[in-house]
Image: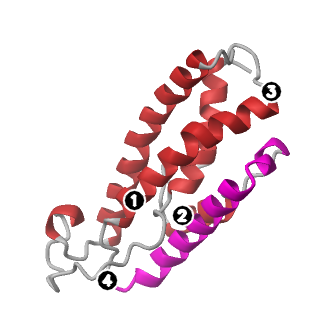
Amino acid sequence: MTKRALAVLFVCLAIAAVVAGCGGGDDSTSSGDTSSGGESTEASGSAPTKAVFIKEADKICADENAVMNEEITEYAEENDIALEKEPTKDQQVEIYEAVVLPNVGKQGEEIAALTPPAGDEEAVEEITDALAESVDDVEASAEQLAEGENPLADASSKARAYGMKTCGSEG
């Protein structure tokens, strides 16, 4: 497996987890003004349109996945993990625990800070809950990754069904 292919593998798993953050995206920060559909939900706190929410979440995923690719390469170099060939299952798990999960957690926090679209709070919460459960499962037993399982598949599926393109993509 090439260096790029390995990075893509980890990114695919991470993207699946990134979809909507850990713990929930429904804060009581909404000001009640839903007329600002084109504004950033971070800045305004008002409920965005679904398209705006998806665009902001996907941007978070894309930006953080680029950072994660660099971090995977740096971690591998610092820990003598050759990415020119496929790392061992143990090394893959090590990289996932050391780099991917912290990145996914950060992405989740950033997306959870966004206000969900009015009426979509429950759908976003379902994505968020699936992600949180997946991350918890992986943290409890990362060895399942060595067996080729994708514990983030449920969250990824929900994100794609919601309309996200970068968050939740698997390839």
Using the rendered image of the protein, determine whether residue 40 is visible from the camera's viewpoint.
no
Q: Which residues are magenta?
A: 119-147
Residue position for label 1: 109
- Apparent side of residue 18 relative to residue 85 in the rendered image (left or right): left
- 144 or 158: nearer the eye? 144
Whether the magenta-drawn stretch holds residue 136 is answered as yes
Residue position for label 4: 118
Label 2's element?
helix
The tag earlier along the polypeptide, 4 or 3, is: 3
Residue 159: mark: 2
Find residue 152 and report its horizontal and vertical position in percent: 66, 57
Cα distance between the residues tagged 4 and 1: 20 Å
Q: Amino acid at mark 4?
A: Ala
- 24 or 164: nearer the eye? 24
Q: Amino acid at mark 1?
A: Glu
Label 1's element?
helix
User: At x 56% / y 47%, what residue is drawn?
Assistant: 101
Whether the magenta-drawn stretch holds residue 35 is answered as no
Q: Amino acid at mark 2?
A: Ala
Q: Which marked residue is nearer to the observer: mark 3 or mark 2?
A: 3
Disc 1 crowd, CA 10 A, few/some/many (<14, 14-19, 20+): some
Q: Splitting the image into 4 quarters, where does residue 28 fall? A: bottom left
Q: Are marks 4 and 2 in contact (CB under 8 Å)?
A: no
Residue 88: mark: 3
Q: Which marked residue is nearer to the observer: mark 4 or mark 3?
A: 3
Using the rendered image of the protein, determine whether residue 43 is visible from the camera's viewpoint.
yes
Judge whether 8 appears above or below 23 on screen.
above
Cα distance between the residues tagged 3 and 1: 30 Å
Q: Splitting the image into 4 quarters, where does residue 115 fall? A: bottom left
Figure quadrant of the N terminus: top right
